[in-house]
Amino acid sequence: MTHLQTTELRPSASIHPSSSSFLKAIGAIVWKDLVAELRSRELLSAMLVFALLVILIFNFALELDPSTRKVATPGILWATFAFAGTLGLNRSMAVEKDRGCLDGLLLAPVDRSAIYFGKTISNLAFMLIVEVVVLPVYSVLYNTNLFNPGLIIVILLGSVGYVAVGTLLSSMAVQTRTRDVMLPILLFPVVIPILIAAVKASSGFLQGVALEEVMPYINLLIVYDVIFTAVAYMVFDYVVEE
Amino acid sequence: MKPQPLTLKVLNVVSVLLFLGALGMVFLYAPLEATMNYVQKIFYFHIANAWIGMLGFIAAAVAGILYLVKHDQKWDIIELAAVEISLVFFLIAILAGSIWARPTWGAYWTWEPRLTTAAILEMVYVAYLLLRQGIDDPDRRARFSAVYTLVGAISVPITFMSIRLFRTIHPVVIGSNPAATTGSFDMTAKMLVTMFFALFSFSIIFIDLFWHRIRLGQLAQNVEQLKLEELQ
């Protein structure tokens, strides 16, 4: 016979402090999101269509003859990822709040940070799926070869950092009056270091620049990812407590 | 509002005097720089405001952490005061820098890393104010503001990292300049003294304004409490 166990309203309440239940909780949340998305496909389709439309707009916004294309590609890619990512983050959290899933998760006897990691991983998964689709499409539309291992690494690092901060801030934004509009306002200033480093590093890899020149930007990405994942993990409790 | 304590009244006067003193030192005591002449003199106030603005943001982050730990509303008032005032100081620094940049670099603004991250930092704190506007519940507002201040303030060291990590045309005042920087200069002793005096003066001005803003915050909190009680 199952019964609901309510947690005390302290930030790190946990009835089963073992690490395996923590990982199980994260896995459960990720699984829930992925399965829900597989059935409805509303989030991914919205993100993908939006990303492709943004690329289309860039075609008219910028004069992309072959030489400019080389220089502009990293910027266009990251602008696309940033905007589509915002969409995904917003929807992901809004769905939780509207259907009362967030309250359910908070009542569950797991560490609050498991919710954070679960949501972050599923948001990351969605963002990576969008990026995996956008790269070949962009390569074909603009006749540029984007299958560069260095570029893939940069996209991975950048997405991790973006989603780490984004999940925290979208949890806050979804609880304000201005909701959807609030997330970009909060997120973009904080995440621009990622965009700078990612664009520079991507550009370096695409143009075949020496590795030593690109490494500082990669290091910056890694440092950013580590710092902000740690910070977000520590403060998430304060953002979702009632 | 409670009447101003004597210390605050004295501080008001001292702040004005120090500001006038700093102004005097900049124009009368500090020597004229060889290549940039008079436009270089804006540097003293630019540096002072930039430093104080940065430290104010760090103070805001510390107040945020203290709020999250202690749940005392006074830290929220302190944090808001620190952010609002630092925002203005930093804005003055950016504007002063732009005025200096025009004759020296040929443009009011360049998108080189340090300027860009400074602009971003400014936008983080404008976003902070917008966030506060969007939340009615005082406790939630204080919690979210504290979290966001923390996240935003982590950008501060990244701003400093950018001057070392990237090649930049922004001069390094303390340390060696890469060959590409324009507008850098070596400071004589008199210039150093003027700079530190300006720094000190603006610190005192900051504390004075900060104190006033905290008093205002306390008044606002009282009004809000009265409003909430009325609604019940």
Image: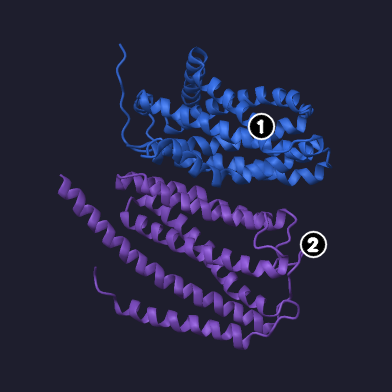
Q: Is residue A226 left or right of residue B203?
A: right
Residue A6 position by quadrant? top left
Residue located at (59% from left, 69% from top): B96
Decide: is A54 above or below A216: above
The hue in which chain B appears in the rendered picture of the protein: purple
The C terminus of chain B lies in quadrant:
top left
Residue at image mark 2: B180
Q: Nearer the viewer, residue B188 or A232?
A: B188
Where residue A8 sits in the image (x, y, percent)?
Answer: 31, 33
Residue at 35%, 69% in the rendered image: B212
**Residue B9 place in picture, x, y as percent:** 33, 79
Q: Which chain is blue?
A: A
The chain containing the residue under callout 1 comes to A
In this rendering, which labeled residue sits more in front, label 2 or label 1? Answer: 2
Kindly tell me whether residue A118 is visible in this rendering: yes
Name the residue type under label 2: Ala
